Amino acid sequence: MKFGDAEDRSFQGCIHVIKIEELMSRTEILAPTLDLASLRAQFPSLTQTVNGHPAVFFDGPGGTQVPQRVIDAMTNYLRLDNANAGGNYATSRRTDAMIADARAAMADFFHCDPNEIVFGQNMTSLTFAFSRAIGRELKPGDEIVVTRLDHDANVSPWLAMAEDRGLTVRWAEIHDADCTLDLEDLASKINSNTKLVAVGYASNAVGTINPVKKIVQLAHKAGALAYIDAVHYTPHGLIDVADLDCDFLVCSSYKFFGPHMGVLFGKREHLQRLRPYKVRPLTEAIPFRWEWGTLNHECIAGITACVEYIADIGRPAHGSSRRVAIEAAYEAIHQQERALLDRAIAGMRQISGLKIYGITDPARFDERCSTLAIRIEGHTPAELATKLSERGFFTWDGNYYAINLTEHLGVERSGGFLRIGLIHYNTAEEVDRLVTALREIVAAGAD
Ligand SMILES: Cc1ncc(COP(=O)(O)O)c(C=O)c1O
């Protein structure tokens, strides 16, 4: 009997008697499939047109669209609950409760305790702030490792820290042919002086998913901290900081259907031990000592709603535990994105002069997510993005701040890549339209 079968419906009413481990193994057996029409109907922006063409949002890596419930949560907060936190009156108490709810939602999302969740302006600001506190403990001769594949937000803060503290910086290189991290090289750059390894979960340019758990183990073996940039990974894959055992992991909710905010997981021991630069009246309790000034309450209100949007994708078959629902949701999201990726790569391979950067062998698609970086001979990425935009496609061109990668691959001076970000709310028909449009653009020749 499979979970969700007719005989199995009784389980849904008494889900509390089933062991979590058993439920988790069941998610592998029967991930819910996406009801794409009803999911898309939740996103008001998806119904727009451009020059008479239905708008196609392939710009998810720059920021995903938001469902109505996120918009409602944010506006309702401003309409009815708007107040500063910590006061002895109704709206302030509701604000405190709302922030606690959002922390609990992100704890389910990351699989950690709510007091290990830190809210901030965005990933970049959080990383600069944490790099200052981490740097306070380091001294000349200490080393850090950054990678050639990463977004600059997980590089420059560490380079600045290294400059301030006199640290040695080691760069982990990539395999140019498939834009994957060279793990042997990375391992060789870690030694007993290494104090921090900063690595991305997935590349926002070429879509490579890094073996983060393995990298965390390498860092820990040397006694170093592992700082994970999960910004690009979050709309595509499940995050489990308990399983990864990373010290820090940071993401931005605007990349997974929420508001423009940053959220950081920090292991409790580090949040307690490290010394933040902070104002005196700010409490020493975690996680509050890491949250500077008044937070962006209306955005935090939207965070619970975006986590609930994801959880709801997994809920129909899996009862009420939000974490279990999130796990199931990502199975379904993965299946949908994998189908889109297969289709896009198969279609693009038929276009002459088109080069896909990153992994293109379908047998290895588990090592990448559905973000594609391409170039087409004779056309600049900016020209392609502009021509596609006239047909209703939203894509990015350039380096998307993965500048160490575009420089290394020698494409920075000629416009970087055209990036096509496939998100679960995209459709097979949209992918087919894109392939047709690219073929037409190529056939028409350069300007
Ligand atoms: C992989 C990656 N890391 C970090 C960032 C920076 O995030 P934020 O805009 O929240 O500072 C981005 C933004 O695009 C990103 O894609």
Image (cartoon, rainbow, N blue to C red):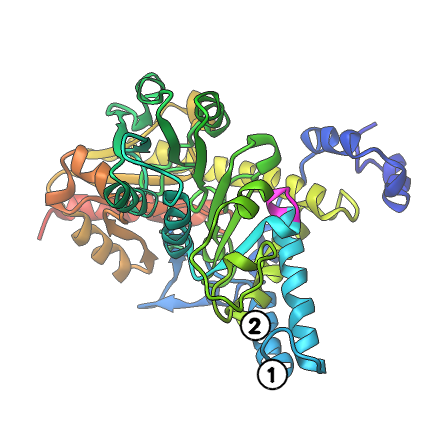
Residue 357 picture location, percent across and down: 27, 33
Q: Is residue 41 visible?
A: yes
Front position in the image: 24 or 49: 24
The residue under label 1 is which amino acid type? Arg
Q: Main secondary structure of the magenta part?
A: loop
Residue drawn at x 57%, y 77% is 75
The residue under label 2 is which amino acid type? Met
* Residue 441 magenta-highlighted: no
Kind of element beneath mark 2? helix
Q: Above or below — where is 415 with respect to 70?
A: above
Residue 430 picture location, percent across and down: 41, 50
* Residue 111 magenta-highlighted: yes
Kind of element beneath mark 1? helix
State which quadrant residue 432 falls in. Answer: top left
Verify CB contact (< 8 Å) between mark 2 and mark 1: no
Q: Quadrant of the N terminus?
A: top right
Residue drawn at x 65%, y 40% is 327
Residue occupied by mark 1: 79
- The answer to whether the residue bearing label 2 lies less than 8 angstroms from the nearest atom of ligand 1 is no
Front position in the image: 365 or 121: 121
Q: Is residue 353 visible?
A: no
Dot 1 crowding, Cα within 10 Å, few <14, some 14–19, many 20+: few
Q: CA distance from mark 2 to mark 1?
A: 9 Å
Dot 2 crowding, Cα within 10 Å, few <14, some 14–19, many 20+: many
Sequence-first tag of 2 and 1:
2
Magenta extent: 109-113
Residue 296 picture location, percent across and down: 50, 69
Residue drawn at x 18%, y 53% is 382
Label for residue 338? none
Residue occupied by mark 2: 74
Q: Above or below — where is 27 with respect to 424?
A: above
